[in-house]
Amino acid sequence: MSTQQVRLSHTDISMSSEEIWSRFPLAKLIDLPVEKSEGVLSSLYKTRVFPLALRHRIWSFFNKTNLDTHWLDQFNIYWTQILSGRPILGVLDFAYLHGVHREKFYQYGEAYDYMEDSHLDAWQQSEVLFQLINLVYRESQHSDTYKASMIKYAPSSGHILEFGAAISPITRSLHTFGISTRTIYIADLPTYAFHYACFRWREKENIKPIVLLPENEFKLPANKQYGIIFCVEVFEHLPDPVTTIRMFYDLLLPDGILVFDYIKSDATGLDTSAGLEYREQVLDFVRDNFTLVLGDLSDTSCTIGLTVVRK
């Protein structure tokens, strides 16, 4: 077998995002076998004997030194059993996979001409498989405990929502460190990344997926209310950010918390023109209808970093 043939069999996935969702819908994912135990280290990260800051440092040490590769073991199961990929033989093998798909994604992003009526299609192209691989890598290096800890500002009632969740890194942090046992909803388009999120939480009764579909105008169900909504690295990608911020306001409980950021992009690649055009209107709505808890909304001409506001 030639080198080229080996490379392709190792890195290329034949199933499209649409096919994966068709072959492995949510109902079928729930029936798949799960790990019996997350391991000793997982219990250590959750224990309340140590403060969260210390547990985060312990987690960082074990993950960044590759002594804890549970993240890779979990992804390898998905990569081989769901995507039918060749097994990933360790961290270096994963790094090679990451590099190959990074190149494909960057070429795709530079050439892609985003159309507002093809929002779902843009995120379902095979090149966007890199989003899944890259976010898995990011999770091995960053715990997102700071973002997850913003739950301390939220009322004690109401559900948690991670909107535009992709592989749901904030939910992962809430779970890994035992920050909250409340019901968490994760919501996103039916992409490779979100399918992985649904796969890895399939046995957790308190973590529930919401698939955003074009026939529902990508809206959330109106029959749930949330005490806190996380919307991080999302607004710049939305086809209608004004409708989204109004939807958040309606779905938040009184005194509910919105945790968000808003990158000032140039509306290229998968960043939408609407995300740039209506940016000021979204931020004006936030200033008029929410109280600032953490962050800075005084200069909207630049990227808005992590911000917490209360309804």
Image (cartoon, helix red, strand yellow):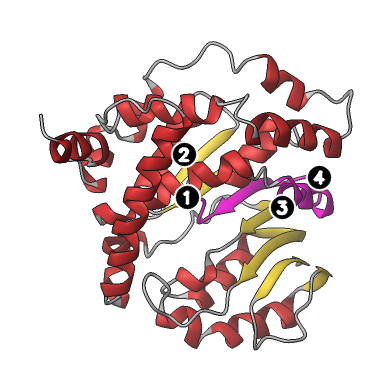
Q: How far across and down, in percent of the image, does residue 277 sit?
A: 48, 87
Q: Which mark is residue 147?
A: 3
Q: CA distance from mark 1 to mark 4?
A: 26 Å
Q: In the image, what residue occupies the spot 75% across and 58% down?
A: 256
Report whether 126 appears left or right of 290: left
Q: Secondary structure at mark 1?
A: loop
Disc 2 crowd, CA 10 A, few/some/many (<14, 14-19, 20+):
many
Q: How far across and down, in percent of the image, does residue 39 sit?
A: 63, 15
Q: In the image, what residue occupies the spot 31% across and 61% down?
A: 120
Q: Which amino acid, mark 1? A: Ala
Instruction: Inspect this view and state whether residue 207 appears.
Output: yes
- Relative depth, front residue between 217 and 14: 14
Q: Secondary structure at mark 4?
A: loop
Q: Which amino acid, mark 4? A: Ser
Labels 1 and 4: the sequence-earlier one: 4
Labels 2 and 3: the sequence-earlier one: 3
Q: Which residue is mark 2?
A: 197
Considering only vertical position in the picture, is 200 above or below 302?
above
Disc 1 crowd, CA 10 A, few/some/many (<14, 14-19, 20+):
many
Q: Which residue is mark 4?
A: 156
* Numbered disc in front, either 1 or 4: 1
